[in-house]
Image: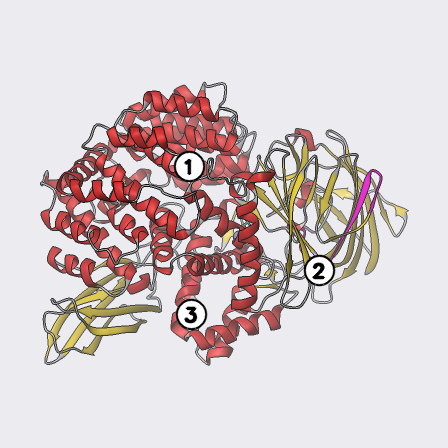
Amino acid sequence: MDNPAPIRLADYQPPAFLVDKVSLTFRLAPNTTRVLSRIAFRRNPDGPGGPLKLDGDKLTLISAQIDGTPITPTLTGTGLEIDAPDAFTWEAEVEIDPEANTTLNGLYMSNGMYCTQCEAEGFRRITYYPDRPDVMAPFEVRIESDLPVLLSNGEEIERGDGFALWHDPWPKPAYLFALVAGELVARSDRFRTMEGRDVALNIWVRPGDEDRCDYAMDALKRSMLWDEEVYGRAYDLDVFNIVAVDDFNMGAMENKGLNIFNSRLVLASPETATDADYQRIESVIAHEYFHNWTGNRITCRDWFQLCLKEGLTVYRDQQFSGDARSHAVQRIEDVQMLRARQFPEDAGPLAHPVRPESYVEINNFYTATVYEKGAELIGMLRVLIGDAAWQQGCKLYFERHDGQACTIEDWLKVFEDASGRALSHFARWYHQAGTPRLSVSSRHEAGELILTLAQETRPTPGQPEKSPLHMPIRIGAIAPDGQEVVADTVLELTEAKQEFRLPCQTPEAVPSVLRGFSAPVILDQPLSTADKALLLAHDTDPLSRWDAGRSLGKEALMAMILDDAAPDPTYLDALGKVLSDMDLDPAFQALVLALPSDEDMAQTLAEGGATPDPLRIEAARVALSTAVAGQHRDTLANIHDSLAPTGPFSPDAGDAAKRSLRNAALALLTRIDNGDRARAQFDTASNMTDSLAALTCLLRIGDGVTEAETFRKRWQSDRLVMDKWFALKVGTAPGETGVGIARELADDPDFTWKTPNRFRAVVHALGANHSGFHAGDGSGYAFVAEWILRMDPVVPQVAARTMTVFQTFRRYDADRKALAEAALRRISEAATLSRDTGEMVRRILE
Ligand code: PHE
Ligand code: ZN
């Protein structure tokens, strides 16, 4: 395996040539698609000079002309180079083979439909072009094909027999280009913008799927309205198209005026989609729509600035979902996700700054750090400068940078200008990898609560030395009687260690620190179990309240894992109080009731210097669940009975909250009733949420064999539901049993592994099954490695992404480490490996 040279931020150079206009003609044919390009180039006055360099990958060049004169360009291996005049028209014809393109990058085919994916660097697989985000141009696209539906970016300006002509007036980088052609049907609607524009909305799907688009359409209209109301941003074309495709590497893609979605993030009906699916569809529809301003109208100068569009757009979709549902629940779920996915990344060999400084393959940097930690930085920025400056800064950003390709420096500057505050210290968050540890100690003295806050970040790959960061720490304090005696306050920590004094007349008050999870840190605050129980019962901040419960749960599990302790009665009692508090949102109660995940426990144990034992963690979690169920049997049964569905299914937050609590209760009760309730629920369930929840409960107690078969028979022909079935079977069986099931299912005729969704439903599902993946005999590691090697030549991006399941392998005992390392070596020693997977395995093994 060779090691390609990394691309570095420090080497950035502006483009030598700019593009004024792009005209493309596609003559579609499965194996021999011809792409004709006509591009107006002009030398960039601020560029470095030199020849015209165009990127190109897997293209067969048929002909090329400059201002009408045929030329023979020099092919460089990654594209071509030409000595060109200062302004000229480039014309080229290339041939490509969409049917042979299994990578799902560039122009490819899925179920007879033509589809594109160009972010980050897929456009170079379509034609020769400066495939970099800082080259923006208007596009005109002619599609020639007999297929009935022919779509591209912008608006259709002509339609005739066998062709369509599209025009996108908004200058855009090539990564936002899209084309779709196929036998599709649309679910259509309209939206009138605040500027009076009447926009046609279409969701294009395979025939038969059109009755599963209502929710996505509703979410789209709500997103459009929300961006007008909250950010003053209106849609800017007369049509907005969304296409659902089954074969897709990622979730969805924000191509200008033509968003392309993984079909699992569009299609929903009560019978086939769970509440979690509905919630995810709503947030991803919003996310891609919001990119129209944060990403498309204002884009990234280079791929190091990815968080400029992704962190901000995640922040915006989280805000939207909070407004649409519940801010408290949204925040808890976002924090849960950050801890589950970003913290392990930041603590392991793949750690990188929110704005990375180098990469080999940019597709490997669409990470939880860039997306989710990127969103956290925006939340912190807002707290630090305050709402008024935040609003003003956003307005300034849209005014100042519309139509530009920007950097994080541009982004921070608008907030410096709006707030009058220097943000150079805060900017370190973008450069420094690793999750800071925040240690808190407190004492009471002469009418004051004295808090000592200390921060420390451990070394990460390439960054041995760390500096203190500027972080907002929201705090309050609760008296033993439950009253809040120190009201919500933001402390600004800028140094390694600082002391803060707050007036407080209650010496016994318990400080509530990191309210709202105001900074993405690991909190180390030594509180007694009684103090945690107090915060769980009375904290006024819902995130801290939930987190106090979480912390109690972890402590209880920790004692069971490390010291064979009995389930902690304080924790059991505290849960009882939450369960019987009728004023609480059931979704919140459900979140408190869910025990810390095995991954969460492994992370916490490793954090504290212990070696996690997956089977002990698993056993402790089961024992604690059983104890909770035993102690609260009647309350839980009452919840499960009284929240039984009454009217017709509605996916709204209120009903979903009740189902989540009811199913959390069922999960516990199934530990002590031999699955009687779960079986009854499975037999009568009229929606996927309740049906899948019941089946999950049964499989988790090693039961549910007949139910799983019934489920499969019923949904055999529904690809999205079958993905759930595969994932559930693999995800619910512990240890080596889990691996055995994964192996069995990998031989199943329905395991169509070249479709990323199905691959993930088995391989990623095993990676997410903690005791399964880390099975003591190494069979989990071997299985995943085998499939990564198999997938790598077919869809390298999916293979590379699967590598992340290995990122925590050094946490475990010597035997497991050796087994995982052997599996990793098998990957790294493969005769051929994609650049994507090559980079991942090198980083993980380093
Ligand atoms: N830009 C997409 C999003 O976050 C993600 C994506 C990246 C999709 C690369 C495909 C390829 O909305
Ligand atoms: Zn995005």
Q: CA distance from mark 2 to mark 1?
A: 43 Å
Q: Which residue is mark 2?
A: 170
Q: Quadrant of the C terminus?
A: top left
Q: Nearer the viewer, residue 683 or 401?
A: 683
- Residue 258: x and y, percent? 65, 49
Q: Which mark is residue 687?
A: 1
Looking at the image, is 32 positioned above or below residue 557?
above
Residue 308 visible to an observer of this rendering: yes
Q: Nearer the viewer, mark 3 or mark 1?
A: 1
- Residue 777: x and y, percent? 28, 24
Q: Residue furthest right?
A: 69
Please report contact status of discs 2 and 1: CB closer than 8 Å, yes or no.
no
Q: Amino acid at mark 2?
A: Trp
Q: Amino acid at mark 1?
A: Asn
Q: Which residue is mark 3?
A: 382
- Relative horizontal placement of residue 718, taking residue 81 as reference (left or right): left
- Residue 408: x and y, percent? 52, 64
Q: CA distance from mark 2 to mark 3?
A: 30 Å
Q: Residue at x 14, y 47 (%)?
A: 572
Q: Nearer the viewer, residue 300 or 237?
A: 237
Please report contact status of discs 2 and 3: CB closer than 8 Å, yes or no.
no
Looking at the image, is 310 positioned above or below residue 211?
below
N-terminal label among 2 and 1: 2
Dot 2 crowding, Cα within 10 Å, few <14, some 14–19, many 20+: some
Whether 170 is among the magenta residues is yes
Residue 774 visible to an observer of this rendering: no
Q: State the SS at label 1.
A: loop
Q: Amino acid at mark 3?
A: Arg
N-terminal label among 3 and 1: 3
Per the rendered image, the range of residues in magenta is: 159-175
